[in-house]
Image (cartoon, rainbow, N blue to C red):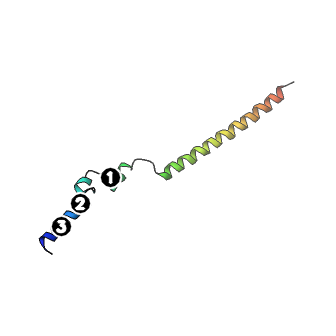
Amino acid sequence: MKLIDLQQIDKLLRKRLKGFATKDDLRGFATKDDLRDALKNHPTKKDLKNALEDLLADVIKVVDKTKADKKDVDKIEGQLSF
């Protein structure tokens, strides 16, 4: 290949790759490890699922207790009515 051919190829490549980012452009962006470190202290999907299941169990417990208390109140009111 002649020098002129290489220059034409270089010119064509520069024209085609004009909109692409270079390594220097990408240096400031976060890497996979940076993102992993940033998310280390946040709950995972599994943690959130477990927390929601625990919350649901607590809500069901409270609803059941409220129903039982209502039955007890209705029973006592039935005994007090003349």
The reply to whether dot 3 and dot 1 touch (C-beta < 8 Å) is no
Q: Which residue position is annotated with label 2?
A: 15
Dot placed on the residue nearer the N-terminal end, 2 or 1? 2
Residue 47 rendering spot, x and y as whole percentages: 49, 50
Q: Position of residue 26 (x, y in %)?
A: 27, 54
Foreground of the two, 75 or 53: 53
SS category of the residue bearing label 2: helix
The quarter of the image holding the N terminus is: bottom left
Gap between marks 2 and 1 measured at Cα:
33 Å
Amino acid at pointer 3: Gln
Left or right placement of residue 43 versus residue 11 in this view: right
Residue at horizontal 72 percent and vertical 35 percent from the top: 69
Q: Which residue is mark 1?
A: 34
Q: Could you say which disc has been placed on residue 11 in the image?
A: none
| Mark 3, residue position | 8
Mark 2 residue type: Lys
Sequence order check: which comes first, mark 2 or mark 3? 3
